[in-house]
Amino acid sequence: MDMESSSLDGRIEEGTKGRSTEVILTKKCLTPSKAPMEQDVESPAITIRKPKLPKQACEDLPKQLVDQVRAKRKIQRYVRKDGKCNVHHGNVQETYRYLTDIFTTLVDLKWRFNLFIFVLVYTVTWLLFGFAWWLIAYVRGDLEHIGDNQWTPCVNNLNGFVSAFLFSIETETTIGYGYRVITDQCPEGILLLLIQSVLGSIVNAFMVGCMFVKISQPKKRAETLVFSTNAVISVRDGRLCLMFRVGDLRNSHIVEASIRAKLIKSKQTKEGEFIPLNQTDMNVGYDTGDDRLFLVSPLIICHEINQNSPFWEISQAHLDKEDLEIVVILEGMVEATGMTCQARSSYVTSEIKWGYRFMPVLTLEDGFYEVDYNSFHDIHETNTPSCSARELAEINCRIRLPFTWSVASKLSQQGVLEPESREKKHTTLVTQEEGLEEQTERNGDIANIESESKV
């Protein structure tokens, strides 16, 4: 046992020299030194496992290791790059609400389920009315008088369930081959024919309308509205701005296009309330009308980082440690169909590049402008201060101070100049003003004498 403890102490001493880090962390996580020795006595076979570090031990790790772990951590998106929201609704008790809006429920289903329901509804309808036609023929005894020319059946040439099913299909789809027809000696058949015609029209309107709406959904139109892979932060007109690029790949344009941006970040209020995934609006030109786009060629959307911006106090070093997400939403009407279309994308912290700008993609050719979408996502590095927008504004204010201020006047404003020097400065100013007044009086007298001499 002494040998085991000495070997453990030797490994710990090696760890203190920098050769082993795991042993040091293990020693921190263990409570009195007797505990592992007693455990060794009870269990002869010892398996060394990597311990799960408690919170206190993790805080003792070097700062570089913590930063590496944080960098390798997978970022959970609120909105994926393709625009789909990464939110799942669970434990929904009131599922009947989906049935109250059955049309929207069917439209929102996936294509395989939608096609299955489409085929199932028509097949069940044909089978039900086929069974009704067969039941009428069975009750009236038409099946017992097949081939009897003296008997007038309800439906001619209906001799079983299969023929009744085929007649149901012909009636509902208005095919009318002419081989099976209803006679005027069957009032219950006439009533069933009216019911099937009305219900068949309702089923057709519902199912065909559902399929039409699903086919013409503008979701696929959003596939041709592209967002830049990265957002950039650089200086534009002397101010820090966050920018991203949007473009439309189709020649048919989006009418009344508008852009919005939201910052998704958890926050804690002054009262201690924790608000997960708090949404904050980011101004992308709402005041000036720049958020309404004429999206003919790719445009760079700019968010000016000012006092009202959530990035006002965020610097480049601070941005790397932030856990935030910017969701951008582009809305407009499809020119071909007039339906409203919405395209979404997002940018996490690793996709916001500080000190970069977008490469130009628009060139002037012979009689037209050409857009090079190969450079749509390209960015290049530019000189950008790493400080926050607030610090940059303070620096600019200092630079704009008037240079006519003397050191003495600056010191007198701060109350550093002595009273005697202030009095001397005041007397010199008074004497200078008196001298100027005397000089102006003399100049006036000379001018008067010259005018009299000329007269």
Image (cartoon, helix red, strand yellow):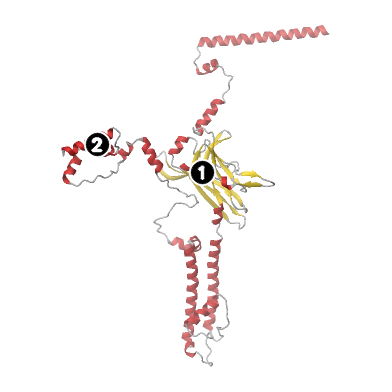
Task: Between residue 420 and residue 389, name the one nearer to us.
Answer: 389
Is any part of residue 194 visible from this angle?
no
Quarter placement of the C terminus: top right
Between discs 1 and 2, the one toward the N terminus: 2
Q: Residue at x 17, y 38 (%)?
A: 3
Judging from the image, what secondary structure is the residue with disc 1 in? loop
**Residue type marked 2:** Arg
Residue under pointer 2: 11
Q: Residue at x 36, y 38 (%)?
A: 65
Q: Which image quadrant: the N terminus?
A: top left
Question: Regarding mark 2 in the picture, which secondary structure is present there?
Answer: helix
Query: What residue is disc 1 on?
Result: 230
Which residue corresponds to the image point at 51% horizontal and 92% vertical from the top-left?
148
Q: Nearer the viewer, residue 366 or 271?
A: 366
The mark total stands at 2
**Location of residue 179 by image quarter:** bottom right
